[in-house]
Image: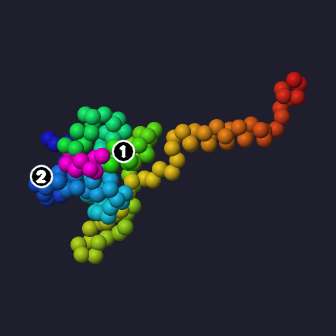
Amino acid sequence: MRHRKYTFKIGRTSEHRRSLMANAVCSLIKSGRITTTVAKAKEIRRLTEKMITLGLSGTLHDRRRAISILHQTDTVAELFSKVAPQYEGRHGGYTRIMRLGQRLGDAAEMCILELIPTTTTPTAAAEAAVSADAKTAETAPATDADTKA
């Protein structure tokens, strides 16, 4: 029985699949967004999230693991130096799939796969939350306990 044994085949050999996924992930890391079919995007997303998680740890061993999967040292260097540090403090969910509709030629469902932009760093978000709490404390009405003192 092969229950719950997920394999992404799409009618290609294993070498072709691995090469396709590595090239697509490298394109996504370099450009930030790619247009592809939904089936491919779901598999590219799985591999991209694993690579970004490797980039977050930043160890030499994880860098070598990423190079062995992606086969492009310049892209891995960009992943570890620019892309992964943006997602510090985030546990997964680095990509987004936006569906576009069907392709005219073969009616395959198309989508845009993109890296989720990070506008604030975790420390800036924490500082903003603290300042918001301070503002609400200043504008809060006085209670009976405050007036007795």
> Which quarter of the image is occupied by the C terminus?
top right
How many angstroms separate mark 2 from mark 1 (CA)? 29 Å
Q: Position of residue 2 (x, y in %)?
A: 16, 42
Q: Residue at x 56, y 42 (%)?
A: 124
Using the rendered image of the protein, determine whether residue 56 is visible from the camera's viewpoint: yes
Q: Which residue is drawn at 23% across and 56% down?
A: 23
**Tag 1: amino acid:** Ser
> Residue 6 versus residue 44: which sits nearer the camera?
44
Q: Residue 116 carries which label?
A: none
Dividing the picture into quarters, in which one does residue 104 lie? Answer: bottom left
Residue 22, compared with residue 101, is above or below; it is above
Dividing the picture into quarters, in which one does residue 36 lie? Answer: bottom left
> Which quarter of the image is occupied by the N terminus?
top left
- Of mark 2 and mark 1, the one earlier in the sequence is 2
> Most prominent secondary structure in the magenta stretch?
helix
Q: Nearer the viewer, mark 2 or mark 1?
A: 1
- Label 1 residue SS: helix
Q: Residue at x 19, y 56 (%)?
A: 20
Q: In this view, does 6 lie to the left or right of 126?
A: left
> Residue 92 versus residue 101: which sits nearer the camera?
92
Using the rendered image of the protein, determine whether residue 97 is visible from the camera's viewpoint: no
**Tag 2: amino acid:** Glu
Q: Residue 81 carries which label?
A: 1
Q: Do the residues labelled 2 and 1 touch (CB within 8 Å)?
A: no
In this picture, which residue range is highlighted in magenta? 69-77
- Say which residue label 2 marks: 15
Q: Where is residue 47 in the image (x, y as percent from the top left)?
A: 27, 47
